[in-house]
Amino acid sequence: MTADLASIAGRYDTDKAAHTHYLRNYEHYFGALRDEEVRLLELGVKEGGSLLLWRDYFERGVVVGLDINPVRLDDPTGRIRTYQGAQQDTELLDRVARENAPEGFDIIIDDCAHIGVLARASFWHLFDRHLKSGGVYVVEDWGTGYWGGWVDGVGYKRRAPGFSPALYRLTRAVARLRENSVVGRVPLAASVLSKVKAGVLRAQFRSHDYGMVGFVKELIDELGAADITHPEFGSAPRRESKFREMRLSPSHLFVVKA
Ligand SMILES: C[S@@+](CC[C@H](N)C(=O)[O-])C[C@H]1O[C@@H](n2cnc3c(N)ncnc32)[C@H](O)[C@@H]1O
């Protein structure tokens, strides 16, 4: 009988073993691929425990790891390959892909710096160029953006989710003015009203856009591409999202490529 992910994780030094919901999510997305010749890339290797975990889980897979620090791993199977370099080094990412997954990776996991601008740089480079259609991109530990002590995190300020009738009435009034055929035909008036509306709405929802949290919220915008470019309500050119699915769970994100 093949071992499940949790028992394989217990053999190795990887913090994935401590996050039981991470392991559950991985089983959910990766279970169907288990016997395939998957090509998996993990950014962030540390001692290499997670590479050993993926090697044992995907018995026919090729497991590639990249880390800013040198990695030394004892792997008699020869199915683990490691590279030293930065996750944001797009030329290195191209080389890693060329040498290991010229047809594209099936799975890419970012468990690396957990810094928003770095995660974004590797995400879009790898997602657009080196992830197969139907492939899965995983981002671990995106909650660092809520930590004031983290490089690019800021402490979260709680605000009671109240409802203000006055602000709501103002929103409706501005929207009605914009729809008014006379006002709507004056470009300057329409543009000023759009700005007023955005300002009023901004006061109703507070978005915490720092670090990894800001990056994840940008990904939600990509998920909204079809609405952003809606022929009647959005702006051209029309396009669908590059994401088939995006699933968020505490500090763990999965994107399936369309
Ligand atoms: C959380 S650890 C990886 C843990 C490993 N994936 C596991 O599950 O056992 C993060 C790793 O990212 C590496 N790292 C940090 N910043 C990096 C960067 N900009 N580029 C490449 N690696 C980086 C660190 O050296 C560290 O080994």
Image: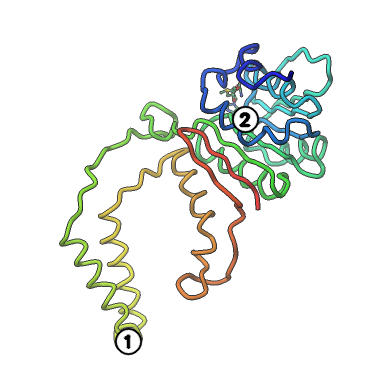
Where in the figure is residue 192, as x and y percent of width and height?
A: 30, 73
Residue 3's place in the image compared with 231, above or below, is: above
Residue kind at label 2, given as amino acid type: Glu
Q: Which residue is mark 1?
A: 181
Residue kind at label 1, given as amino acid type: Ser
Where in the figure is residue 112, as x and y percent of width and height?
A: 58, 29
From the viewer's perspective, tell me whether residue 192 is left or right of residue 114. left
Determine whether the residue tagged by mark 2 lies in a helix, strand or loop.
helix
Numbered circle sitting on residue 204 = none
User: As drawn, which residue projects farthest toward the left?
Assistant: 166
Where in the figure is residue 18, as x and y percent of width and height?
A: 52, 18
Q: Residue at x 49, y 40 (%)?
A: 248
The quarter of the picture where residue 92 lies is top right
Q: Is residue 70 visible?
A: no
Question: Colour scheme in the image?
Answer: rainbow
User: As drawn, which residue projects farthest toward the bottom?
Assistant: 182
The quarter of the picture where residue 211 lies is top left
Q: Is residue 20 visible?
A: yes
Determine whether the residue tagged by mark 1 lies in a helix, strand or loop.
helix
Q: Which residue is mark 2?
A: 27
Residue 218's place in the image compared with 155, above or below, is: below
Which quarter of the rendering shows the N terminus?
top right
Determine whether the beta carbon of the residue marked 1 sits less than 8 angstroms from the nearest atom of ligand 1. Answer: no
Residue in front for this viewpoint, 93 or 101:
101
Alpha carbon separation for disc pair 1 and 2: 55 Å
Disc nearer the start of the sequence (1/2): 2
From the viewer's perspective, tell me whether residue 112 is left or right of residue 153. right
Neighbour class for label 2 at 10 Å: few (<14), some, many (≥20)? some
User: As drawn, which residue projects farthest toward the front?
Assistant: 1
Determine whether the beta carbon of the residue marked 2 sits less than 8 angstroms from the nearest atom of ligand 1. Answer: no
